[in-house]
Image (spheres, helix red, strand yellow):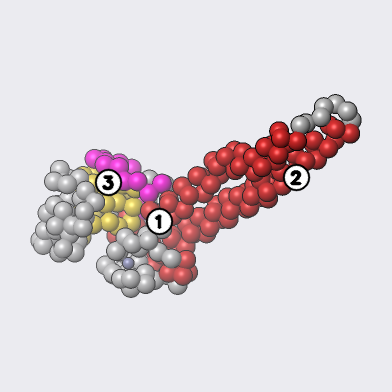
């Protein structure tokens, strides 16, 4: 099976919406062989063909082995570009996004799991930071009792008050990685038609609440 995708009217092409003026007349060829292997070939398009990686970043490609789930963009990313999932070519109707929403649902599941895991770590770290001051008091008390060392009151005060801050700095990496995971969600869990980020509700109900794609 071979699909030529572009803006030209003639032949057995897969046409893209008229407003996608970054797409060339004959932009890209996608083939599916008898073994179900997918491949893509840019047909010397003006604005290029791109595929999206796991982090939601698009990379320019010329020929590439792809899968049914590969997200492809025709054009440089402006409003005239056209984005679609390779498997969408098999959809019975052009405006049918059932397959994409099923994929998104699976991705959202994995995404939420990862976010919750990181949130739990953050919560635990928050408690550790809160109790760090008490830990300092306890250690000073024990050292004092065992006559190992007597921490002067001034130093003790500094240690107690700075402990939570120090712990916060040490745990900062987790906060940064949670933010990165959330940012990735905004890039990856997007509507297959209008490309705007989808909410959990949208994904659950398999419909974009903005453009109504479903
Ligand atoms: Zn949409």
How packed mark 2 is, by other alpha carbons closer than 10 Å (few <14, some 14-19, many 20 or more), is some
Q: Which mark lies nearer to you, 3 or 1? A: 1
Which residue appears at 84% of the width and 32% of the height?
143
Which residue appears at 18% of the width and 57% of the height?
80
**Is 13 a magenta residue?**
no
Is the residue at mark 2 in contact range of ligand 1, meaning its CB lies under 8 Å from it?
no
Looking at the picture, tell me which residue is in the foreground, 121 or 5.
121
Q: Position of residue 130 (x, y in %)?
A: 68, 49
Is the residue at mark 1 in contact range of ligand 1, meaning its CB lies under 8 Å from it?
no
Is the residue at mark 3 in contact range of ligand 1, meaning its CB lies under 8 Å from it?
no
Sequence-wise, which precedes: disc 2 or disc 3? Answer: 3
* Residue with the mark numbered 3: 50
Disc 2 to disc 3, C-alpha distance? 54 Å
Which residue appears at 12% of the width and 54% of the height?
25
Q: Which quadrant of the rendered structure holds the C terminus?
A: bottom left
Looking at the picture, tell me which residue is in the foreground, 105 or 132.
132
Toward the top, the furthest residue is: 148
Q: Is residue 129 visible?
A: yes
**Is 58 a magenta residue?**
yes
Q: Position of residue 155 (x, y in %)?
A: 71, 33
Disc 1 to disc 2, C-alpha distance? 40 Å
Looking at the picture, tell me which residue is in the foreground, 74 or 111.
111
| Side of 162 where 149 appears, left or right | right
**Range covered by the magenta-colored residues:** 55-70
* Residue with the mark numbered 1: 186
Q: Is residue 15 visible?
A: no
* Residue with the mark numbered 2: 134
| Side of 141 where 46 appears, left or right | left
How packed mark 1 is, by other alpha carbons closer than 10 Å (few <14, some 14-19, many 20 or more), is some
């Amino acid at each position: 099976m071979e699909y030529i995708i572009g803006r030209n009217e003639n032949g057995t092409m897969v046409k893209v919406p008229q407003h996608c003026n970054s797409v060339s007349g004959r932009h890209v060829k996608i083939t599916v062989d008898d073994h179900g292997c997918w491949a893509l070939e840019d047909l010397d398009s003006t604005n290029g063909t791109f595929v999206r990686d796991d982090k939601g970043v698009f990379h320019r490609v010329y020929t590439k082995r792809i899968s049914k789930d590969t997200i492809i963009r025709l054009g440089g990313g402006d409003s005239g570009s056209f984005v679609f999932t390779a498997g969408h070519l098999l959809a019975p109707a052009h405006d049918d996004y059932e397959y994409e929403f099923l994929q998104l649902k699976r991705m959202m599941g994995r995404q939420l799991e990862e976010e919750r895991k990181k949130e739990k770590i953050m919560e635990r770290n928050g408690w550790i930071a809160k109790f760090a001051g008490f830990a300092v008091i306890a250690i000073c008390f024990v050292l004092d009792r065992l006559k190992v060392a007597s921490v002067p009151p001034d130093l003790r005060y500094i240690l107690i008050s700075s402990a939570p801050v120090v712990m916060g700095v040490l745990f900062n990496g987790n906060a940064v990685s949670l933010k990165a995971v959330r940012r990735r969600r905004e890039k990856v869990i997007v509507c297959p038609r209008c490309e705007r980020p989808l909410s959990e509700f949208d994904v659950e109900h398999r419909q974009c609440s903005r453009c109504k794609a479903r």
